[in-house]
Image: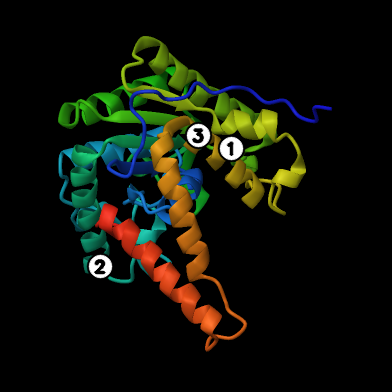
Amino acid sequence: MKLFTDFSIEKEKINTISYNSKIVLLGSCFSENIGNKLDYFKFKTIRNPFGILFHPKAIEKLITNGINQKKYSENDLVFQNEHWHCFDSHSNLSSITKSDVLNNLNTAISITNNALKEANHLIITLGTSWVYRFIETNNIVANCHKIPQKNFIKEILTTDEITKSLKVIIDLIKSVNPSINIIFTVSPIRHLKDGFTENTLSKSHLISAIHNIISSDRINIRYFPSYEIMMDELRDYRFYKEDMIHPNTTAINYIWERFHTTFIENKTRETMNEIDTIQKGIIHRPFNIYSKQHEKFLINLSHKKNEITRKYPFIAF
């Protein structure tokens, strides 16, 4: 008996991910989920230097500023709730002093610039088409930083606007890294504060725009259906956290399984299994830390670590 629908995803045959790959992840919360998995398995990753970014315009601005090596100044900051913020970044980069924020921003710009030039793979997760425009400057912001909503106009990006934004992103990146492989995906997280219908409309704009890009230029550009897996294969509330918005651990693990069987080379998955064994060994809590059995376990674990670091010197446990 078949209890759910599943669909096949074309496996990447040429531009696969290995332990020699350098991977950059940008975008919404789901980039963090995939990034955490890649970090666990000790891949070389750079994840969201400007913090979580939800919509295409925010990602476009980060990439534009990163490639052009923008220098942030006091004019780019706003003060709210006793902290200094920047509308281009997540509040993770905010601080109580201007100097700290500017250091965070300019360091992140440098990291972004270097990462985009050196990356083999860029994974971009789009979360929403809804954006907020700061009335005072008429600029779309990446984060409102809890500034009262009366200071913003809420609007939705059209499919054409998103398509244009994605084209700018691709052209900018390929101007400094022509061989980079770009993977787009749409976050399965539901933005229900916008409304149920509005969330569906938002996701449809993102998906349509991505497929506009792919249909016009498939060179080193792929789409991974995170959203579709959640909506169609895992169409049950048991795969959500208690807020009924975010995928739970089971769902994240399932989507990760589909991701790594699609993009990660077979030989690399053997090393991933070895690293998984080590990671589980590290968090193992013995009944008796002074026993001969535990001493033997630690020696064996140390041997496994050394074998991995001998093959991949950049990996540290």
User: Does residue 46 lie above or below 154 as drawn?
Assistant: below
Cα separation between marks 2 and 1: 34 Å
Q: Quadrant of residue 57?
A: top left
Closer mark to the observer between disc 3 and disc 2 = 3
Which amino acid type is marked by label 1? Pro
The residue closer to the viewer here, 190 or 295, is: 295
Position of residue 310 measured from the top left corner of the image (x, y, whole percent)? 26, 58
Q: Which mark is residue 100?
A: 2
Of 57 and 231, nearer the camera is 231
Quarter holding the C terminus is bottom left
Question: Depth-wise, is mark 1 or mark 3 nearer the camera?
Answer: 3
Q: Which residue is mark 3?
A: 261
Q: Is residue 15 above or below residue 102?
A: above
Residue type indicated by callout 3: Thr
Please name the residue that numbered disc 1 is placed on.
188
Q: Is residue 134 visible?
A: no
